Amino acid sequence: MKADPRGVLTGVHFIDGDHACCEGALAAGARFAAGYPITPSTEVVERFAARVPTVGGTFIQMEDELAASITLQGAVWGGAKAFTVTSGPGFSLMMEHIGYAAMTETPCVFVDVQRGGPSTGLPTLPAQADMMQARWGSHGDYEIIALCPNSPQECFDLTIKAFNLAEEFRVPVMFMMDEVVGHMTEKVVIPPADEIEVTPRRHTHKAVEDYLPYQTNGDMVPEMAHAGEGYRFHVTGLTHDERGYPNMTPQTQDKLVRRLQNKVRAATDRIAMFEEEQLEGADVVVVSYGITSRVAQRAIDVARERGMRVGKLRLITAWPFPENKIRELAAEVKAFVVPELNLGQMVREVERAADGRAKTYPVSHAGGGVHNPEEILRVIVEASRCR
Amino acid sequence: MPVKDVGLVDQGVVNPVEPFLRSDRMPHIWCPGCGIGTTVNCFARALIESKIDLQSLALVSGIGCTGRVAGYVKLDSFHTTHGRAIPFATGLKLANPKLNVVVYSGDGDLSAIGGNHLIHAARRNIDLKVICVNNLIYAMTGGQTAPTTPGHATTSTNPYGTFEPAFNLPHLVEAAGAVYVARWTTFHVRQLARSIGEAFQKKGFSFIEVISPCPTLYQRRNKMGDGLDTMKYYKEQSKTRHGAPTSEVGLTLKGEIIVGKFVDRDRPDYQTMMRAQYVEALGERFVEAPEMVCS
Ligand SMILES: Cc1ncc(C[n+]2csc(CCOP(=O)(O)OP(=O)(O)O)c2C)c(N)n1
Ligand code: SF4
Ligand SMILES: [Mg+2]
């Protein structure tokens, strides 16, 4: 279905990533946000607070992130498309409710504008060190989707994508920005509403008496109903059966938790988005994401000028990790170079997928700035000499 | 630490409230003599008497023995996370203002881990009906001290008796801004049902505290007998004082229980204030929130 034109600010803008993310959410049909202020993410909800009463919808500033991360889920069950926005410390507080959204299959978006950690860390400076937390931060086995924009334009485009994926798979989608992308101002083109595809809710068409809230038909994703429509359904974070009723047996647990995982895993290749460049015949492939991909570009260009055969793979989808892509490349190339603003997170996934067939070189950075392209170049040179 | 397989009949919770219950989920998990079933019965009676449209009614619980209420009522019902029933309910209500949203949860859930949400929802005057089953203990996890446990009570985590001062919940929520505050015990079934009905007539944050026995973990450990002895205690020691200053209704271990309707006042609820502010500030530019059904 096409976007509701009321939420779409069609035109050419010069805005930062945080504001572009807000416009993406509005274009995607988000009409509800709950948040709690935290640098460097607050501009997203500040803009939403200003815009939403002129579009039709609600913003509420909650008392903390524990509240914000569940208030938005109440709104989803009330019929809204909803999201919350935060950064490091707030993201940590939201973990229990990421698990709740996964367990109850509540489609929603969590935006994390990453800053340096741990703890209060570097409130105004970038990092990419929440990547594993986004995947594993809540207890138990579950699966989420995570996207990594590298420009304000992508903050707009991919926020729409994040909402669409949330609806398609009924999962919480993590929108993993970083401080630089959030605060960087660039040209953002917002297309007309009729050029924007939005995924509608998987709302049931079944009659009340035929509806089972967690029954699936083939594609592993159940259909939703909203409160107030007469379905009189039950939702719980306890292990539940197709009726949505608590059923705490190992059998029900096995069936439910495997489905929650498989509905995303089975679609990994379809969800996977990446940007690739000169992978054919490459000796070394630089795997990067977010702001680091833009710094890495410089290192890649210089390496190529010096005659090295360097490919580029930019992860747009971080989770589910596109391991098939890495596996295929590992059979062709000598090494992967993985720069990221953390002490080694996604590089572990690259290494796991490469499974020894190609070497893996991390280029770590504790956060607080971006890499110097020289550091990445040095590792590319080293990697291209490996056997 | 509820026991299994207690027939609902034990609670007298059959007809005419049956249409409100998920009979396919019976038997429930509550212990014999537990007060939670009694409160559910009152709730169902209040729904019948006040002729609330069940389709527009949603119930939200947190976690605990009381939190299990959400699983037994035949309504759109949400069993959320520990302490977060109120913020979940806030999102539900704001997204669909036509819903009547009830929060049904325990004293620990609402006033300890969820205490921050409780006071802020009251301050904002979110239009929610909160039913707090106060058994003075964390029951589900085995009888630990709650912020409501009266001084000198014995609990599993204060085996030598509690010494921290307890919350007086009516006083707390009144100070925070609730428009309707009442307290009853599970002995006061008719009064409780009436209060629930009255809360449905209010627009704004309403709070009904129900003092309720947990014979398994509280009464027994404090040598207060079984469910029946507790009813006797409630009957003898309760004093109805409508309009009593909430500062005077704090509870003690074996003393008097002041019950009644303490607060009944009006002030604009969150959504009314929000809309008015937008209309004033934005004029023509304000766009009414749509019916949020995005199918
Ligand atoms: C985040 C979190 N912390 C702790 C628990 C464990 N827990 C479950 S119920 C409960 C206390 C419930 O007490 P109350 O709200 O008074 O409900 P009751 O069982 O007495 O009805 C606790 C601590 C939990 N489920 N989640
Ligand atoms: S509150 Fe006490 S009596 Fe009631 S079910 Fe829980 S443990 Fe049993
Ligand atoms: Mg309790």
Image (tube, rainbow, N blue to C red):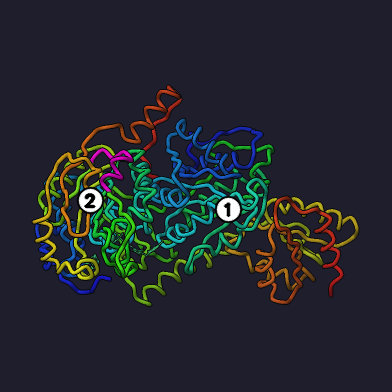
Identify which residue, A355 or A368, lies in the foreground: A368
- Which element is circle 2 on? strand
- Which element is circle 1 on? helix
- The quadrant the C terminus of chain A occupies is bottom right
Q: Is residue A351 above or below residue A195?
A: below
Q: Amino acid at mark 2?
A: Glu
Is residue B40 something one can see in this rendering? yes
- Which SS does the magenta portion mostly show? helix
Q: Amino acid at mark 1?
A: Gly
Identify which residue, B25 or B69, lies in the foreground: B69
Q: Is mark 2 within 8 Å of ligand 3?
A: no
Q: Is residue A135 above or below residue A297?
A: below
Left or right, A254 with respect to A22, comes to: left
Q: Position of residue A291 (x, y in %)?
A: 70, 50
The extreme right residue here reads A306
- For label 2, the crowd category at 10 Å Cα-Cα, with few meaning under 14, some 14 to 19 and many 20 or more, is many
Which segment is the magenta one? B169-180
Residue at left offset 16%, top offset 66%? B224
Left or right, B170 with respect to A316, comes to: left
Is residue A207 something one can see in this rendering? no
Q: Position of residue A158 (x, y in %)?
A: 59, 48
Tell which subunit mark 1 falls on: A
Q: In what quadrant does ligand 3 lie?
A: bottom left
Left or right, B198 with respect to A197, comes to: left
Q: Is residue A379 above or below residue A40?
A: below
Identify the disc placed on residue B209: 2
Q: Position of residue A46 (x, y in %)?
A: 53, 37
Identify the disc placed on residue A88: 1
